[in-house]
Amino acid sequence: MFVQENNDSGNSLSHSVIWKECLKQIKENVTLMTYNTWFLPIKPLELKNSTLKIQLPSNFFWEWIDEHYNTLINRIIKDILGSGAKLEFVIKDDPELDFKSKPEDPPRKNNTAPAKAKPEFESCLNPRYTFDNFIKGEGNQLARAAAGAIADNPGGTSFNPLFVYGGVGLGKTHLVQAIGNKIIKGFPEKRIIYLSSDQFTVEFVEAIQSNKINEFSGFYRSMDVLIIDDIQFLTGKEKTQDLFFHIFNTLHQSRKQIILSSDKPPKDLKGLDERLISRFQWGLAADIQPPDLETRIAILKRKADDYGMTISSVILEYIATNITSNIRELEGCLIKLLANASLNSKEISLDLAKRTVKEIATDRKVNITIENITKAVCNYLNIDENKLRDKTRKKEVVLARQLAMFLSKELTKSSLKSIGLNFGGRDHSTVIHACSAIEQNMLLDNSLKDLVDALRTKIEISST
Ligand code: ADP
Ligand code: MG
């Protein structure tokens, strides 16, 4: 036990020493994740008459700690300072929200004591994605402007949530991460996390299995900025949606910034809880359209500069005219052009550009294989891949098999014969039948069409 002097307020070190000792004991009593999430961000402010004043990052922290760890930390502080010891909580930057007892001094503001503390978790942002290297164009104007406003004032604009949607390879991931990267620079104390909705689901399932749902949900509720990419993959996952709904509400109520991306607008997310769809429309839903010719040229110019290539504008224009739908492909084309030129020690000529563009068009289909497609379909529908190759006629297996055949025909260059062979040596007429069954049913059943769209996106994303 520490011996506590009556008048220890003059000793500026003592509060941090005592808190360090508390932390040591807390660490022995909670999991590392709990410790990192809830206790490391706490700052000791002052020790006066056996009362240790500590500062919590947000109201939510206080509620969480009060509900889950009050007994523990009270026991520990009494162990250290004696039975008369007390804890006093203040909430950072919010004098209205002092708890337990009134502090004599207002809580310290962030600007007087800058929080230099590094966040104790990975934000998972890729520093490559910045606003600086994000080219503005008509197709992304609104989304780009809203993203910039949020980065300057996270949680403080009416764009909450920001919902960015658009096709594959148009810059959604780039833009939402650029927001995160700028916030890290401007507001180093903020807790930011980026992840895809798939990762979110995987972590959720793990949390269920290890009985850690409270910790899982608490971790995300403790964020200042939550960025979830490709939210469309939450469709059909009811339990995950339900938990996400509660996290969303907590964050939104305490004006934390939520940023989401999707391949389609909120109202088209079939299989997603209505409550979520309506919340996604509370802030701003901004689309990203494929770039126009000028923007494509600007993007190519910028990328060429970044790679240290000098390419004539005739060539850039040729590429931009011929690769139109997807920025990832524009990038891919430049890299390939560079590779072709250096491999064959050739100048980058219009002729070489023409050949490269042609190769890209062929590659588009080569990257996607029947195997990828089968995997994606089975994953999505939760079906054992082997079942697609054996004789099972169970309804859900037949559907999965037909979907995989249909997508193989659409997305690969494989012949009907080789598609059939890949599914347990079936005949090419079976493939034709499968394709027309899916085509016809899509006309009658919108949910099947949505399923095909979701699968197509998933396959395209995983193959690029
Ligand atoms: P999405 O998430 O919409 O599928 P990404 O954000 O992954 O697309 O973008 C694909 C590639 O194109 C990335 O390498 C990204 O940096 C680049 N890109 C997309 N939009 C732009 C833009 N406006 N300016 C510069 N590069 C871009
Ligand atoms: Mg993306």
Image (cartoon, helix red, strand yellow):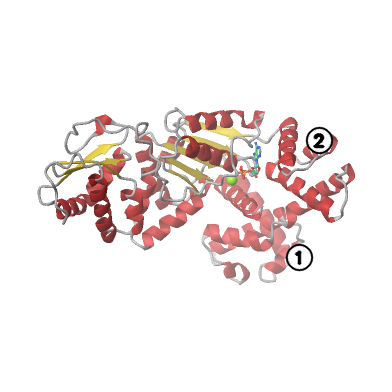
Q: Quadrant of ligand 1?
A: top right
Identify the residue position indicated by label 2 in the image: 317
- Secondary structure of the residue carrying numbered label 1: helix
Mark 1–mark 2 CB contact (< 8 Å):
no
Residue 180 horizontal/vertical position (percent):
50, 40
Instruction: Tell me, yes or no, if residue 177 can be seen here.
Output: yes
Q: Which residue is mark 1?
A: 417
Instruction: Identify the residue at horizontal 77%, vertical 37% (top origin).
Output: 320
The answer to whether 288 is drawn above or below residue 334 in the figure is above
Q: Can you tell which quarter of the image residue 6 is in? A: top left
**Image location (x, y in percent) of residue 152:** 49, 30
Q: Is residue 289 left or right of residue 90?
A: right
Splitting the image into 4 quarters, where does residue 143 fall? top right
| Along the viewing direction, whichever of 44 and 244 lies nearer the viewer | 44
Mark 2 sits near ligand 1, with its Cβ under 8 Å away: no
Q: Kindly identify the amino acid type of the residue bearing the numbered disc 1.
A: Lys
